[in-house]
Structure formats: C-alpha cells, structure tokens
Image (cartoon, rainbow, N blue to C red):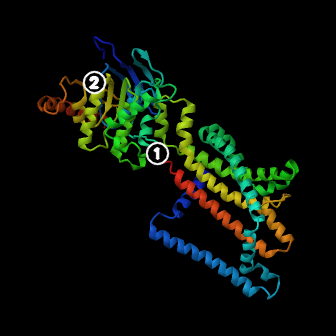
Amino acid sequence: MTQAGPSPLLAARALSLAYPGVSRPVLASFDLSLLPGEVVTVLGPSGVGKSSLLRVLAGLQQPTSGVVQIDGAPVRDVHPRVAIAFQNPGLLPWLSLERNVAFGLDFKHQPHLSAKERAARVERAVAEVGLAHARTLHPSALSGGMAQRASLARCLARQPKVLLLDEPFGALDEITRAEMQQLLLKVVRDFGTAVVLITHDIDEALLVSDRVVLIGGSPGREAGQWRIDLPHPRGEQVAELGRIRVEIVTRLRQATSRLN
Amino acid sequence: MSDIAGELRESEVETAVSAPRAVPGRQDAGLLLGLTGLGSILLLWWALIHFLAAPGGLGERFSPLAAFASLRDLVTGSDLFLHVAVSLKRILVALGFALLIGVPVGLLVGLNRTFEAATSPAFQFLRMISPLSWMPIAVMVLGVGDTPIYFLLTFAAVWPILLNTAAGVRNLDPAWLQLSRSLAATRWETLLHIVIPGVLGHVLTGVRLAIGILWIVLVPCEMLGVSAGLGYFILDTRDRLAYSELMAMVLVIGALGFLLDWTTRMLHRHWGHAG
C-alpha cells in the first residue's frame, strides 16, 4: 500500500520470506508502511509468520525477496534506531534491572550519549514502566510481568524511531496492561515513534492502534486492514469499536479456516 | 565433545545437589552427620593400628595419637608453613595458566563449530592421558625445579576449565544473543557483555573441578627433584623414618584440600548463579 502525503518512516515492500528446506514460504508479497507516530497492530492466527515479519522488519533476518526501508534507505542489517522487544524478555541474569535497561546504550553502533544522558534515560524509562522501586533487583527476583516491563523499558531508554513489539504485554495483569498501553501511546506522542505491535488480543489492538493489519493464509498475506480514526482514550467508544471488532473477528475466522 | 559436556554437566548437577541447603535445622543435622563420618574414619584408623600393629613395633608410629602429637609440633614450627606456602603457590600459578589457556580456547571451541570439530578428538585424547605420565618427558625437556611442575599441573587443570567453558558457550540463552544482535552489538561487545559473563558460572565449575585434580596431582609432582612443597615433605619424612610426621602430613594435605574445595564451592555459590 502507498501513503499519500508525508513519506513513510518504515516501509516494507513486496516482502516474502521462505525458510530453506520448507516448501511453502512463510510470507508472500507483503507490504507495510508506517508514518512517524503511527501505531500499527498485526493480528493473525498462530504460525502465520507474525514474529518472522517482525524479525525481518528489525533487520535480524533477511527477506527472501522484497525490501525494508527506513527513511527511504534500504535496511540490510540491524538499524540502531529500531528497537525490538520479544515475547521472552531476555533479561541478563547477572545484571540488575537498571543495568539491564541501560544494556547496549553505550554500544559502538548506537547513537552516542554521555554517561549523564544515559543515566537520565535509564532512570526515566525505569520510572515510566513503574519499576523505580525495583531498579536494583536482579531478574531472578522479578515476576514475569515485571520482567516484561523491564524489557519494554530497555527499548524505551533507546528512544527509538521505530519500536517493534512482539506480544509485549502478554504476562501482565489487566490493570498493568492498560497502564502499559497508555505508556505506549505517550511514547508515540512524545517522540513520534512508529510502532508495530503484534498481539493476539483484538481489544488491545482496537485500543492502541491507528491501523490494524490482519495476516492470514499460507503463505501469510495481508487479509484485511482497518484504519481506526478515533481519539484516545477509546475505552468508551464501544459502538464504533464493536463494529470494527465484529469485522475483524469474522475475517480472522476466515483466515484461520483457510490456514487449517 | 558433547558427551564430555554432558558428563561435566552431570557432575555439576551432583555438586549442586550435594551442596547443603540454607535450611538451619537441616544444615545442623548435615554438619553433625559429617562430623560423625570423620570421627568414624579416625576410629577405624585407631582400631586398625591398635589391633593389627605389633606392640612397640614400627606400625605403632602410624597411630593417630602419634600423628596428632607430630602435627602439633609441625604446626608450632615454621617448616610446615613454608612447604604449604610453596605448594599453594604452585596450585595458584598452575590454575592461572590453566585459566589463561582454558578460557580463551574453550570460548573458541564453543563459538566455532569448525574449530570444535578439528580439536575435539585431540582434546579427548590428551585429556585422558594421566598428567603424571608426562613426568619423565617434562623433566627431560624442562629440567628439574618448578617449571616441570607448573607444566604438569597446568596440563592437568586445563581440561575441566576448557571443556566447561565450551559447554557454557553452547548453553548460552539464545534470547541473550538475539538481544545483542538487535542492539547492533559488535562481535567484541557480544563477547565482552554476553558471552563472558554468561559462561562465568560454567568457568567456576571448571575451576572447582580443576582444583580437585590439581590437589591430587600436586603431591606426586612435588616428589620430582624439588626441595620444598608438601610432596617433597612427605618423601623427606619417609627418608627420615619420621612416620608419625608422615601421617601428620597426610592429615594436613587432606585438610587443606577440603578447605580449597570449600572455598571454591563458596565462590561458585556467590558468583556461579550469575546474579
């Protein structure tokens, strides 16, 4: 799909992805583009290649064909301004939460920050995810939800242009989940970050996204796209959200039955 | 190589299980049982000498009472500490060399499949040769003195460190490596910030196994043309027919070995969990 007006921050064109030795590709001719400050949620049945798509967008995996661009320039490797949070928080057990959040900020290919700036970013990110009280704890002392929030804080501390999130709120209780969704929207407002969010939760998709993209079929292709032009917070716009929800669920069912 | 890694992991599991838990009551009971076991050995030693040795004969000089009397004399003198210091220095120097060689080579084996395939049979072959069988060659090539001892001890200690380090690299959580990739880390940054801290627990397991081996190999190595050290002292007591001192030295060697193992176990408990 092409965007009229401002040029996209992140663009994926005609992506396809196949694994060697597997006859059917995972993704085929998939297009996606995001403007700065746009939140796009990718929904789809399990095994349809959503996580693979995210890895390709992050530059962790090369597509079989097609191209990923950031600010119009093709991306062939990991981009320093793209942050990705995986389902598995992947905290390093020998570092405190704070040091986990700071991890990588001083790496060579990351934008240069003074020690003071790094400390300030870490402090802010830890506070934003509500873990200031736990900043000296090691991962073994954190609950699953706290670890996921720490992993999100690690991405936020980098103030990325593009934030890729793979089921980042899966282990959180309802209240914390709602808080993290609000935090995500705040980050988008403050920094103009473009977000690609993978989730199984349609309600989450409806509450945070500007667009919902459904992937279905095998190989995975775009099976539907909805633009949600409603102001935040959306909790009370039940009628409009409900209408879109029904559409998405219907299309998701079709996509799932086609997959089976 | 993977077999060895498995074997080492098993021994590691064993130590983890046998390490006393921090439950106060159970710990006390464990301590009491341990002391009972040590007491039984003493009793057995006494009984063997008492019932088997001819009264007034040579055998009586090996009795626990004579050994403890000699031990008291040794501890109040300065000779013993000189020999202990010399032996401990040899252990530490050899451990240092073994770490300097074992950790980098272990990292390479763990990180590079080609290198692993190329070196695995050679390492298995070398590792199974008793370090003591190199003794004559070591003396011929390196002369008498500390150098052949360092060589032999290092040769004995390097394998558990090398193989444990390699096993540690293979056991690194893929999520950590993915994280470092996603942060565009250089190879050096990944090595320094992920691989090395990630294998630390395994290296410490290797060190613990190495110290156990070192302590066992040390004494015979020191019977090899040197003039100080615990092994030398044992031979010296034999030559002087000071059998009670010989038994006292056996006690000292056992006690020091126990202490060394305890120290590395504490180190492992503190650092081995990597946080």
Element marked by disc 2: helix
Q: What type is the residue that disc 2 sits on? A: Arg
**Above or below, comparing residue B153 to residue A249 in the picture:** below
Residue found at the very far left of the displayed protein: A239
- Label 2, label 1: how many angstroms apart (C-alpha)? 33 Å
State how many labels appear.
2
Q: How many residues crowd mark 2 within 10 Å: few (<14), some (14–19), many (20+)?
A: some
Residue named by callout 2: A189
Residue B182 drawn at (x, y percent): 46, 31
**Above or below, comparing residue B22 to residue B148 in the picture:** below
Indicate the quadrant where residue B210 lies: bottom right
**Relative horizontal placement of residue B33, taking residue B149 as reference (left or right):** left
Q: Does the CB distance between marks 2 and 1 fall below 8 Å?
A: no
Residue named by callout 1: A93
Q: How many residues crowd mark 1 within 10 Å: few (<14), some (14–19), many (20+)?
A: some
**Above or below, comparing residue A176 to residue A221 in the picture:** below
**Relative horizontal placement of residue B211, taking residue A229 as reference (left or right):** right
Chain identity of mark 1: A
Element marked by disc 1: loop
Mark linked to residue A46: none
**Residue B3 is at least partly visible in this image:** no
Instruction: Write the residue at 73% across / 86% down.
Output: B50
Residue A130 drawn at (x, y percent): 31, 39
Residue A74 drawn at (x, y percent): 44, 17
Indicate the quadrant where residue A2 lies: top left
Instruction: Write the residue at 60% across / 48% down.
Output: B203
**Relative horizontal placement of residue A23, taking residue B171 as reference (left or right):** left
Q: Are marks 2 and 1 on the same chain?
A: yes
B43 or B129: nearer the eye? Answer: B43
Q: What type is the residue that disc 1 sits on? A: Pro
**Residue A104 is at least partly visible in this image:** yes
